[in-house]
Image: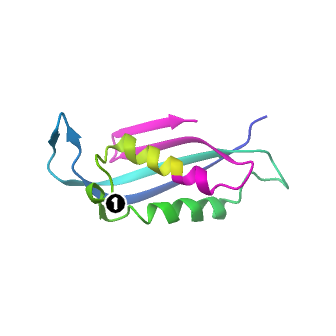
Amino acid sequence: MKSRVVERFKFEAAHAVIINGQAEEIHGHTFRLEVAVEGPLENGYVIDFLELRAIVEGILGKLDHRNLNSLFENPTTENLALWIAEKVQEKLPTGVKLQRIVLWEGDENGVEFEF
């Protein structure tokens, strides 16, 4: 049996994605993030919701209300999701692993990675 914990978050940020060597006009989004982690049930839980929330919110604090071009060479939603995933995985306790991350750029466009 696999056990997963899922948390949802949102943050606001601006970016100008570079497509075919051309930067778009800078524009903003409400990004919505879903993080799923998996691990063994110990004492009835995989990871405390509050612990996972603190980990992810600490990472998103570096992105919220920022111009993402000042942080990333090309701040595509895919690049953001992979960066967030790497940072989350680094901070998870032993035995808990990142299983999936979904990052929505607004209401209609999103990317999903499974690990």
User: Where's the N terminus, which quadrant?
Assistant: top right
Horizontal and vertical percent for residue 97?
Answer: 66, 45
In magenta, the rendered stretch is: 87-115
Q: Is residue 73 left or right of 102 when viewed as pictured? A: left
The residue positioned 45% from the left and 61% from the top of the image is 60
x%, y% of residue 98? 61, 44
Q: Nearer the viewer, residue 24 or 46?
A: 24
Residue 82 picture location, percent across and down: 45, 44
Q: Nearer the viewer, residue 109 or 70?
A: 70
Front one among 12 and 98:
98
Query: Is residue 96 covered in magenta?
Result: yes
The residue tagged 1 is 12
| Residue 26 coordinates in the image, percent (x, y) | 18, 53
SS of the residue under disc 1: strand
Quarter the C terminus occupies: top right
Q: Residue furthest right?
A: 43
Instruction: Name the image colouring.
Output: rainbow
For the residue marked with disc 1, what is the amino acid?
Glu
Residue that appears at 50% across and 36% down: 113
Few, some or many C-alpha atoms within 10 Å of disc 1 (few <14, some 14-19, many ≥20)?
A: some
Residue 110 is covered by the magenta coloring: yes
Position of 51 with respect to 29 (left or right) is right
Residue appearing at x 51%, y 47% in the figure: 85
Examine the image and state in which quarter residue 52 appears.
Answer: bottom right
Between 65 and 79, the one lying in front of the other is 79
Count of numbered labels shown in the rendering: 1
Which residue is found at the position 56% from the left and 53% from the top?
Answer: 88
